Amino acid sequence: MGEDLWAPHALGDPELSPPPASAPGGVTLVIPTFNEAGNVGELLKRLGAALPAHLPCEVLFVDDSTDDTPAVIEQAAPQCAFPVSVLHRERADGGLGGAVVEGVKRAGTEWIVVMDADLQHPPHLVPELVGEGERTGAELVVASRYIAGGSRAGLAGSYRIAVSRAATWLTKGLFPRALRGISDPMSGFFAMRRSAVTAPSLKPLGYKILLELTVRCRPAKVAEVPFVFQDRYSGESKSTAREGLRFLAHLAALRTASTPARMIGFGLIGLSGFVPNLLALWLLTGTGMNYLAAEIVANQAGVLWNFLLIETLLFRDRRHRHRADRAGRFALLANADLLLRIPLIAVFVARLGMAVLPATALALVTTFFLRFAATETLVYLPRRAGRTTRS
Ligand code: GDD
Ligand code: MN
């Protein structure tokens, strides 16, 4: 497909040519909406002006609104030269990310473009994103605020700019290979070939759907187009501080998707558990408690700390057992680990003739692996494919 086909066409008579049903290179615009009644009309108008009339484009809103956004869309749809549909979800499973995944699943066209409904993403760039993909053969084209010609003008306030920048660095640092060539992994505006969406299940936590797609699907070739992040046309951002926490949990889930990575996370969390453990020990012995009793109680503080972190960071999508059940199993394993270590050391020293220090180290490593394996199989159940978590 040549680039001239994708050149944005001039304003005017888009209603002349309804898109041929089966032409190649079709585009589905997936637009998540949550109470955007004040934006969707203007958005459709500007899309009408931006989309080349001779190429098959369709718009799919995935809506979780509690206002009359779907009604406003249905009213505006007949005036559009391209098909417009609304998928209204009764349950907002997965929030923004879940909505996009729903839309991506339904799209049957060669290209999918994801964009926000609040006009922070300039509609005139839609043909440019797809055109860049066609020209370069890229599977993913990201609209970036961080390359020459782009900017984040519409990001409200220096605080949000700083947070966004820090989040970008952290993300790029954690996924240097998957995000090579992507300067703006936080962007919510991108075009992706349908054929490149290969992950068996996508479970974005919250806003960062592009991150989920790149890390889980690893598109072979990526390209970027600069864009200026605009001010919101109407209404307010739906992003909250909670979204920030969800983002960190999402990063952890993506980073620890493989067993070896999860094992490293498990070990690091285990090490961090010494802090609450020693702190509790210090507090308890300070109250005059017998030091052995204090050891046992303080150990539970470390266990609780580890449990909470492991739950939220490593096994978030595998928490199918009842919470009390998981906590009980986890605590049992953690304390069994402690009890098992002494006889193990005795075996290593007495039977294998090892010195005490290497025997202790080997016992620590052995119980670590045992505990990890037991946590994987006895505390948490395998991830269920093809389902999105409730936000
Ligand atoms: N269906 C659905 N469900 N849509 C939602 C939901 C939800 O729970 N929450 C938000 N949306 C829609 C909004 O209606 C809007 O169209 C789009 O998702 C983006 O939401 P905003 O609330 O406007 O997000 P933002 O402007 O703070 O963040 C945008 O820019 C970030 C870059 O700084 C998003 O594009 C982010 O993905 C992006 O990282
Ligand atoms: Mn926005």
Image: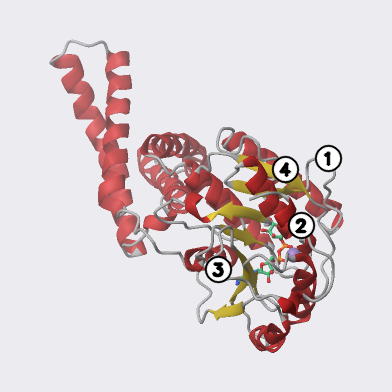
The picture places residue 384, in percent across and down from the top left corner, at 34, 59
Does 28 sit above or below residue 148? below
Q: Residues within 10 Å of mark 3 (few under 14, many from 20)?
A: many
Amino acid at pointer 1: Ala
Q: Is mark 3 within 8 Å of ligand 1?
A: yes
The mark that comes first in sequence, 1 or 4, is: 1
Foreground pick, 30 / 127: 127
Which image quadrant is residue 357 in? Answer: top left
Query: How many angstroms separate mark 1 from mark 2 (CA)?
Result: 15 Å
Q: Is mark 1 within 8 Å of ligand 1?
A: no
Foreground pick, 155 / 273: 155
Closer to viewer: mark 3 or mark 4: 3
Query: How many angstroms separate mark 3 from mark 4 (CA)?
Result: 26 Å
Which residue is labeled 1 in the image?
A: 148
Closer to viewer: mark 3 or mark 1: 1
Foreground pick, 83 / 65: 83
The picture places residue 110, in percent across and down from the top left corner, at 54, 58
Q: Which mark is residue 166?
A: 4
Q: Residue furthest left?
A: 351
Element under disc 4: helix
The mark that comes first in sequence, 3 or 1, is: 3
Which residue is labeled 3 in the image?
A: 99
The mark that comes first in sequence, 2 or 3, is: 3
Foreground pick, 307 / 232: 232
Which image quadrant is residue 114 in? Answer: bottom right
Closer to viewer: mark 2 or mark 4: 2
